[in-house]
Image (tube, rainbow, N blue to C red):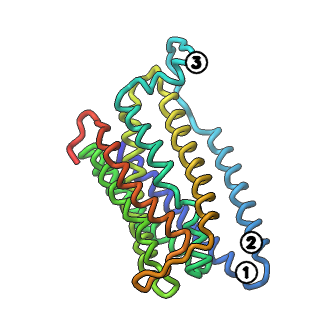
Amino acid sequence: RGRFFGLRNAIHGIIGVCAAYAAGRGMDWLKAQGLEPVGYGLAFGLAALFGLVSTLLLFKQPEPELEPRPALSLRRTLLGPLKEPQFSRLMLFLAVWFVTGTLASPFYIVHMMKNLHFSFAAIGVYSMIGGVIGMLFQLLWGRVVDRFGSRPVTVLNFALVGFMPLLWLFATPSFRLPIWGDALMNGVVWTGASLGLWSLLLDLADNPVHRESYFAIYTVVTGLGAFIASMLSGVIAQSLHSFRLTLFGFEFVNYDVLFLAAGLSRFACLPLLLRVHERGSKSV
């Protein structure tokens, strides 16, 4: 299963790399022609169009017939999986991680454009680096998951993603190396974290009575956590809009406060993840 999803995600990454770079080049060309608003409209329009195409293709996806299962009450359907210790521990970790560890997520691209003066094409290259490297590491992490289990891959990579927001603290318009380092880590560790987490979720969601409920709860927890984090980060960024601090030759702005908070929070969440156990997996 690890190799299956690794290959699936690698194919997904190839398409994402091509789309991101093409969009960046196209946006730069339209901006030079004074048509930047048209570029945004075109990008969102194409995204909606391809979303519709993918939905139509999904209708053609074959699905095994559902096996007869006992009828459950709504309460048991919604809350039954949370009575399973390992699954509830994973949901607690994800709830805390998404509320705190994604605080800076809305502002990475904003910071690149507003303060680091990246062009659209440079942002496309940033996405390409993570995408190309991610294609290779999806395959690698898939094999590692199959050999050692989902938990060690998940823990290792979630530990490493804590460094990523901290790299942004030291980037300047003339010193972009930390951003390229972040792009590299996107390809190496984010792919491992995503693949490991998804595989771990599948391993823990093994009660056929609650099969759909596991994924519904997972989506609610991660989506609600990201929503709360985005709302909080907007309030924090706005309240610190005039923040400026020069230290050791680096100037720090309001977004840097969020990068610091997100990085430290990711490390602080790791003990919650270590409480999650998986049958048959190797140690971290």
Please tell me whether mark 3 sits on a helix, a strand or a loop.
helix
Q: So how many labels did they put on this image?
A: 3
Residue wearing tag 2: 39
Q: Cα distance, mark 3 to mark 1? A: 52 Å
Q: Where is residue 126 in the image (x, y as percent from the top left)?
A: 50, 73
Above or below for 28 versus 217: below
Instruction: Return the disc, 2 or 3, that comes first in the chain's sequence.
Output: 2
Q: Where is residue 97 in the image (x, y as percent from the top left)?
A: 44, 48
Residue wearing tag 3: 74
Q: Which residue is drawn at 45% across and 85% down?
A: 175
Residue type highlighted by circle 2: Gly
Residue type highlighted by circle 1: Lys
Residue type highlighted by circle 3: Leu
- Relative to 122, is 137 on the left or the right? left
Q: In which quarter of the image is residue 220?
A: top right
Q: Cα distance, mark 1 to mark 2? A: 8 Å
Q: Which residue is drawn at 54% across and 24% down?
A: 78
Instruction: Return the disc, 3 or 1, that comes first in the chain's sequence.
Output: 1
Please tell me whether mark 2 sits on a helix, a strand or a loop.
helix
Q: Position of residue 69 (x, y in %)?
A: 50, 14
Q: In which quarter of the image is residue 191?
A: bottom left
Residue wearing tag 1: 31
Q: Do the residues labelled 2 and 3 touch (CB within 8 Å)?
A: no
> Which mark is drawn over residue 108?
none
Q: Are marks 1 and 2 in contact (CB under 8 Å)?
A: yes
- Relative to 281, is 68 on the left or the right? right
